[in-house]
Amino acid sequence: MEIRKTVPGDLERILELYENARKLMRESGNPNQWGDHYPPRELVCEDIRLGRSYCLVQDGKIAAVFVYFFGEDPTYRVIEDGAWLNDRPYGVLHRIASDGTCKGAGSFCIQWCLEQCKNLRGDTHKDNHIMQHVMEKNGLIRCGKIYLEDGTERIAYQREIRAEKDE
């Protein structure tokens, strides 16, 4: 398995992965997080253009996609019913989706993100038990709740890997 930046020629495959993820969400009791059309094609194209879309490739085939960037996420400015682990600069993980053919794809992507930044934040819907499990399995801690721009609530997670000398 390897991670690489997504390129414009990957667009149709990426859209397939997101469609597969929406189907899996509906089947696992999470029909509302992404509904029938999220993320829209325009947002996926913007992610690729900005260089924040990445894919996991196995055996020459894109098996998963996710968004990662280092910097502030405006929806993380306010957290309720808890607190972030720290206020240091952080990486952000969003919109992870897999075709289900690569066991451990979610964990592989999260671990790659942690290798890039050592301080990672992400969020997921209260009904997305699959993603909650993957985040917690990879050491992300439930910190509280945040609200997206449209007002919908998400469970906020963070993990920081500190060097021994910093502890």
Image (cartoon, rainbow, N blue to C red):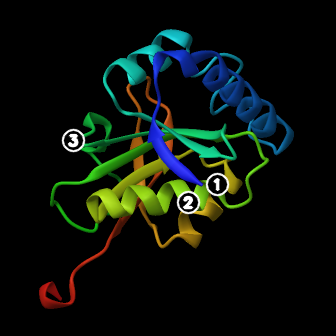
Residue at point 47%, 63% (across, down): 111
Q: Give amino acid for label 3.
A: Glu
Q: CA distance from mark 2 to mark 1?
A: 5 Å
Q: Position of residue 77 (x, y in %)?
A: 23, 43
Q: Position of residue 70 (x, y in %)?
A: 25, 45
Q: Give amino acid for label 1.
A: Ala
- Residue 11: give its label: none
Q: Position of residue 74 (x, y in %)?
A: 25, 35
Q: Secondary structure at mark 1?
A: helix
Pick the residue in front: 151 or 69.
Answer: 69
Mark 2 = which residue? 108
Cβ atoms at labels 2 and 1 below 8 Å apart = yes
- Relative vertical location of residue 154 with respect to residue 117 in this rendering, above or below: above
Q: Is residue 105 left or right of residue 139?
A: right
Pick the residue in front: 114 or 73.
Answer: 114
- Relative vertical location of residue 90 with respect to residue 82 in this rendering, above or below: above
Quarter-of-image position of residue 150: top left
